[in-house]
Image (spheres, rainbow, N blue to C red):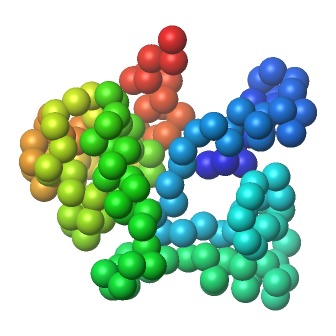
Amino acid sequence: MEHFLCTTLQNRYGNTEAECAAVLKRLTIIHLHGRLGYLPWEEGEGRRPYDGVITREALDICIKNIKVVHEDIKDGRDRDFERARELMRQAECIYYLGFGYGPVNMERLKISSLDEKINYGTGFGLTQKECSDASRLAGGIGKLNPVPGMDCIQLLREYVDFT
């Protein structure tokens, strides 16, 4: 996500990577299932470029930073779900990009306990029934509104007011 946003800002506005990275550092992006490493301009242990080169070092970085959804997170090592829940409670709008709507993730995020607000989500590859099931599991349409067939770019273009 960070690579996409940085590259898009660079191409759209002609800014340098450093200028775009400075803007992106103000965003909060939480990777609930880990990440494949940090980009060279990001702070964090295990930096690597966003490219298709597979090396032992790159694989080690990926392995070290991935979190499996069914792993026990009660041991305190994963505060990302707590942080995400807090940000979701404070948010006026929530947009779920690339979210799979798995029951374990939805329970860990406690989506059903959120107040109703503007909530939309991608539904790329999902049927109307699968999107309806996700809404029901979350506590109703006001809690979660995945759009069948919608990818990330379409959702941002159709539902997000950037003004």
- Whole-percent x and y of residue 140? 10, 42
Q: Is residue 157 above or below residue 116?
A: above
Q: Is residue 52 visible?
A: no
- Whole-percent x and y of residue 96? 38, 44
96 relative to 46 in the view: left or right: left
Q: Is 136 in front, or is 21?
A: 21
- Whole-percent x and y of residue 129? 16, 49
Q: Is 121 in front, or is 111?
A: 111
Quarter occupied by residue 26 = top right
Q: Residue furthest front?
A: 76
Q: Is residue 99 above or below residue 75?
A: above
6 relative to 93 in the view: left or right: right
In percent of the image, x 68 and y 42: which residue is there?
25
Q: Is 99 in front, or is 115?
A: 115
Q: Is residue 88 above or below residue 51?
A: above
Quarter occupied by residue 122 = top left
In percent of the image, x 84 and y 32: which residue is there?
19
In percent of the image, x 32 and y 43: which residue is there?
88
- Whole-percent x and y of residue 62? 67, 77
In percent of the image, x 82 and y 52: which residue is there?
41
